[in-house]
Image (cartoon, rainbow, N blue to C red):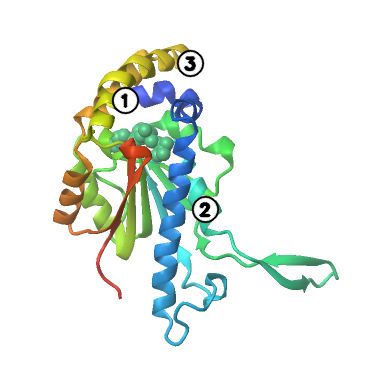
Amino acid sequence: MKSPVRKMFDGIASRYDFLNHFLSCYQDVLWRRFCCKRLKKMMGAELRDEMPGLLGKTPLSEMPRGLNKVRLLDLCGGTGDFANTFRKIFESGRKCACKCVSQNGASRVETSRDFVVDPAVIGDFSYGMLAEVKPKKIDAHAVQLDAMKMPFAERQFDVILNGFGMRNVPDARGALMESYRVLDEGGYLCVLEFFSPRNLFNKFFYKVLAPLFIPVMGAFFSGKRDAYEYLVNSIIRFLPVDQFCKMAEECGFEVRQVKMFDGGISFGVFLRKPGKA
Ligand SMILES: C[S@@+](CC[C@H](N)C(=O)[O-])C[C@H]1O[C@@H](n2cnc3c(N)ncnc32)[C@H](O)[C@@H]1O
């Protein structure tokens, strides 16, 4: 049977990106960007530490080939915005000064990339959301899956992103354990999420302001008021960030960093699967 949450995301898929940006005043774009940059910093530092004699000196783009390769899963990835941001940020690098001359004499400037990202896997249970990935021409495979029971063998990924998905799955602990299983040792899970409000400002925002304007705006632009009422209620019902971190630790993760955005409207939680130096 199709779950009501899946049906709801199928129903709003075509307006999802627009409303996401509009309702958050484009903050969602900045939050995703921040998370990817922070992940890159963390992983880059580890990569440099692995190279004896080159501590902190070698640019990522000059690392021996293969070491800087990333297998990415964008879980609850929806329309693929997080995976897209990740690729842009991880693959940015310095323009290499060298000109490569091909056999037919044509020359081109090579770009050396900081990391090389394999075609990403964007996993989501809503077919409607995944259908929005294609027009974006992201180098990725869209896979319909359940975050609590993924069709992957163990240790398949170096990074898992989960943007605003955790509070939608019926069992967050199950999704954390399943993410742990498919993540390689030393890999990162980055959860960007609206957690249950704790301080006065956030309680006022989510319990008084948001229920007034989010469903109205959602209804106006998508015709689906229920979906945007669900959005607000799902935030209030979800765990506070400290309880989520405790749960992640119980599942085996190390909590590397918790970054609060905009006074606690959302948080980026950086988790690492122990293993590898
Ligand atoms: C709020 S959207 C987030 C989309 C995207 N990650 C982003 O950053 O905008 C939440 C997504 O989680 C998906 N989702 C919810 N429960 C899921 C589950 N059990 N398994 C897989 N995907 C799920 C929904 O279909 C939806 O696309």
Please, is residue 39 above or below residue 140 in the view? below
User: Tag 3's secondary structure?
Assistant: helix
Mark 1 or 2: the one toward you: 1
Task: State the residue at coordinates (45%, 29%).
Answer: 20
Say which label, 2 or 3, has the lower sequence index.
Answer: 2
State the CA–CA distance, disc 1 to disc 2. Answer: 28 Å
Asked whether residue 160 appears in the rendered view, the answer is yes
Please, is residue 184 above or below residue 24 in the view? below
Q: Which residue is mark 2?
A: 87
Q: Which numbered tag is attached to residue 231?
A: 1
Q: Residue furthest left?
A: 250
State the CA–CA distance, disc 1 to disc 3. Answer: 15 Å
Q: Nearer the viewer, residue 154 or 193?
A: 193
User: Tag 2's secondary structure?
Assistant: helix
Q: Residue furthest bottom?
A: 53
Residue type beneath disc 1: Leu
Say which label, 1 or 3, has the lower sequence index.
Answer: 3
Q: Find residue 114 and report its image quarter.
A: bottom right
Task: State the residue at coordinates (44%, 68%).
Answer: 44
Say which label, 1 or 2, has the lower sequence index.
Answer: 2
Q: Residue 218 in the image: state x and y as whole percent.
A: 42, 17
Q: Residue 64 in the image: state x and y as whole percent.
A: 52, 78
Please, is residue 140 above or below residue 182 in the view? above
Q: Quadrant of the N terminus?
A: top left
Drawn side of residue 5 relative to residue 62, left or right: left
State the CA–CA distance, disc 2 to disc 3. Answer: 30 Å
Ligand 1 within 8 Å of disc 1? The answer is yes
Q: Residues within 10 Å of mark 1 (few under 14, many from 20)?
A: some
Task: State the residue at coordinates (29%, 47%).
Answer: 150
Q: Which residue is mark 3?
A: 221
Q: Which numbered tag is attached to residue 96?
A: none
Ligand 1 within 8 Å of disc 2? The answer is no
